Image (cartoon, helix red, strand yellow):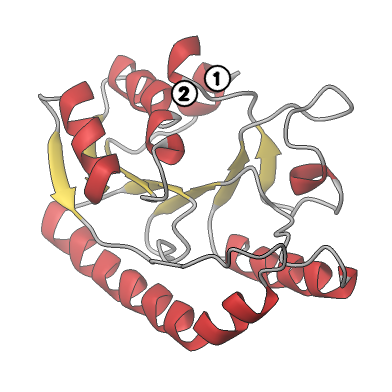
Amino acid sequence: MLSDIVDKISEKRVLVAPMNWGLGHATRCVPIINALIKNEKEVIIAAEGFALEFLKKKFPALQTIEFKGINIKYSSSNSQVWAMIWQMPKIVFAILKEHFEFKKIIQKYDIQAVISDNRFGLWNKKIKTIYITHQISVIVSKRFEFLNKIAYLIHCQIIKKYSQCWVPDFEGENNLSGDLSHKYPLPKNAVFIGILSRFCD
């Protein structure tokens, strides 16, 4: 399924940019990068921290860019409501900063397409932009369901800025993400692409 969807990327020079929250986002980019290389794409990796170091070791021949992203601190309590509200101005500023920095990267490296793993600010009308997330529905509160619905609607507005949204899971009952990607309707530009794992590569 992944090879079929990657085959549809006609652009030659592709930027792959995972979020640096743990290594999960970077590791699931491994089969994507391998599929791009197999299709003779010119792949550039843009990341920071552990994600960048991991991908450098995995793909030493590829060009890499240090590209700082959003740093969100989660609450140690069950509810993330106040933690998210408190950081909202910081989050919005970081997304805009990431977005404008991305414009510079497009021009400097002649980027024709980007695959962004959960990085909110990498949309651009002049090139193909692909957003990866398994969490269409963002869970911010277990008590107040309406807040989760608001977070979902906000996330959908971000997703709609991209050309496509890839959801790394299966559609239907036999899925792994549960409510995170199946509770609410998918945005119109979103599609399930199956599980992404470097162990399945």
Measured in 3D between alpha carbons, the distance from the residue under mark 2 to the one under mark 1, in whole angstroms, is 5 Å
Q: Position of residue 51 (x, y in %)?
A: 29, 41
- Front-most of residues 96 and 104: 96
Q: Which residue is mark 2?
A: 7
Q: Which residue is mark 1?
A: 4
Q: Is residue 98 above or below residue 30?
A: below
Q: Is residue 63 above or below residue 39?
A: below
Q: Is residue 120 left or right of residue 102?
A: right
Q: Position of residue 190 (x, y in %)?
A: 68, 46
Residue 108's disc number:
none
Q: Position of residue 70 (x, y in %)?
A: 38, 66
Q: Quadrant of the C terminus?
A: top left
- Front-most of residues 71 and 37: 71
Query: From this viewpoint, is residue 59 visible?
Result: no
Q: Is residue 124 above or below residue 16?
A: below
Q: Is residue 149 left or right of residue 43?
A: right
Which picture quadrant has residue 41? top left
Q: Amino acid at mark 1?
A: Asp
Q: Is residue 25 left or right of residue 137?
A: left
Q: Is residue 35 above or below residue 64?
A: above
Residue at image location 55% in from the left, 86% down from the top: 86
Q: Amino acid at mark 2?
A: Asp
Q: Quadrant of the N terminus?
A: top right
Which picture quadrant has residue 195? top right
Residue at image location 32% in from the left, 15% down from the top: 38
Residue at image location 28% in from the left, 21% down from the top: 37
- Front-most of residues 146 and 39: 146
**Dot 2, how many residues are within 10 Å of its Cα: few (below 14), some (14-19), or many (20+)?**
few
Q: Is residue 110 left or right of residue 75?
A: left
Pointer 2 with pointer 1, Cβ within 8 A: yes
